[in-house]
Image (cartoon, rainbow, N blue to C red):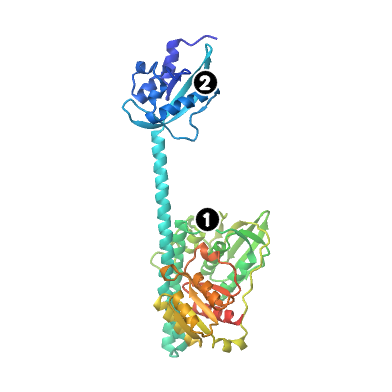
Amino acid sequence: MRSIPAGLAQSVLDAAPDALLIVDGAGVVQFANRQVSVLFGFPHDDMIGQPVEKLLPERFQSRHVAYRNRYLAAPHVRPMGLGLDLFAQRKNGTEFPVEISLSPIEGNGRTLIAAAIRDVSDRKRVEAELIEARVIADRANLVKSRFLATASHDLRQPLQALALLNRTLRSVVSDVNASQALAQQEQTIASMSRLLNSLLDISKLESGAFKPELADFQVSQLFDELRREFAAVAADKGLLLKVEECGECVRSDASLVEEVLRNLVSNAIKYTRKGSVRLQCRREAENVRIEIHDTGIGIPADQIPYIFDEFYQVGVSANSSREGYGLGLSIVQRISVLLRLELSVRSEPTQGSTFSFVLPAGKEAEVPLEHKQVPPTQQSNLHRARILLVEDDPAVRNAARLLLTVEGYSVTPVSSLAEAQEAAAAGDKIDLLITDYHLSDGETGLTVIAAMRETLDQGLKTLLITGDTSSVICKIPQDPNLRIISKPVDADEMLNLVEVLLGA
């Protein structure tokens, strides 16, 4: 094999993108390519014969001698200082981060060390900027999550008071015109509640405030809930809601899957003028496919890519009357991404649409406790019960007190745990505790429940009212003497839960 001329070898090494050094066992520089001068600022001839430690910050020089001796004891190809931040020093005294690769060279009975040195200043700067950007983004998400938690509570409070006052007035007003006005007011409050919930849900999904809580659960639990919720809505439109039996178990976040189904079923009913809406599931190998099929107006092929956009509604012009706000499918799409659902749409104009998604099959889940219904014969006795109401918002507290009083209950309204404890110390029997989740000064409804049960009775019947939709609420253990209801509260639903708890 012909040897490479020395001049050519020098030219090749000078053309290398990295600075290349060759040092002997004593750490003396024997060779340096052109990039060494470019990188460190030393003329080439000033480097030859100098100790390599001359290229290091002074604080590292003594330690480097020990590292070099250990390397010579077992020389092999490897990066220098693996896992450490390495720094070199230019002639002008400035430091910069480097990466160094070492290779032993055997020749003439001695071991030389070849070192390839690369300036990584730009990469380190980019990494630092990315870390800083991530910290800023995490901080912004935390602030946004806190804001949304506050907004979920504070924005729902006025609607909560309106809903309770509306229900109270409907119980006592007999004038026909006034009753019609209250009925229209009720519809307006419900519309405002739906819009607020949708906007907050989208904001929470965008901010990352929703964290999936995976567990095994029966699909039939969700199907039964949706049947109860939408059967009357569909019947009012002259539609048949078909909810087929499903014995499958899946693994996902039950509350988020329920939200997907609720929006899809609601959307199907909204866009179906006659016929039916069918909810079904079927097993597909290791997965379960859930389908929502309707006989509605269908979706033109060119509009399907846009149906998941906010405020987009099929066949509705910008200045026409709207039924809903076009946010349901946007929420569905965001939850599908979060849960990694395989969401698909099949549709044909005038023939209807089918939305479906796939969930991984799960193991058998425990059947939740059934809510007992109150026998009619017991209801007159229930309305003489004493209720302790804990709510820090004066408007909501007064509205709830009025509603419960009109219904015949004896109500003690308080604003904090301390006032609740004072009421309990008065000695009057308390049959039911109703408490808001978020209270003033960092108190929560869970704190109130624990304290009241410790003072009165561990089996104290409790209704927890919350505007918080975070995973904290989902993690509250099942309790046969506790019911949880979300704001803005439907007054009739709240009264029904009160009767269920008092009759249990």
Q: Can residue 379 be seen in the rendering of this structure?
A: yes
In the displayed structure, 51 sits above or below 278; it is: above
Front in this rendered view, residue 310 or 393: 393
In the picture, measured across the screen, residue 388 lies left or right of residue 35, that is: right
Nearer to the camera, 14 or 26: 26
Residue 29, placed above or below residue 393: above
Residue 138 in percent (x, y) is at: 43, 52
Question: Which residue appears at 42% of the width and 11% of the height?
Answer: 7
**Mark 1 to mark 2 CA distance (whole Å):** 51 Å
**Badge 2 amino acid:** Pro
Q: Earlier in the sequence, mark 1 or mark 2?
A: 2
Q: Residue at x 42, y 73 (%)?
A: 157
Q: Amino acid at mark 1?
A: Leu
Is 91 on the left-hand or right-hand side of 313? left
- Mark 2 crowdedness (10 Å alpha carbons): few <14, some 14-19, many ≥20: many
Q: Is residue 424 above or below residue 290?
A: below
Residue 289 numbered tag: none
- The reply to whether discs 1 and 2 touch (Cβ–Cβ < 8 Å) is no
- Estimate the x, y position of residue 125 in percent, counting from the top left: 38, 38
Instruction: Pick the quarter of the image with the N terminus.
Output: top right
Quadrant location of the C terminus in the rendered image: bottom right
Which mark, residue 338?
1
Residue 321 shows up from this direction? no
Which-is-in-front pick, marks 1 and 2? 2
Which of the numbered marks, if any, corresponds to residue 104? 2
Image x and y of residue 184, in percent: 43, 80
Compare residues 234 and 361 and report the one nearer the observer: 361
The tally of labels here is 2
Quadrant of res 291: bottom right
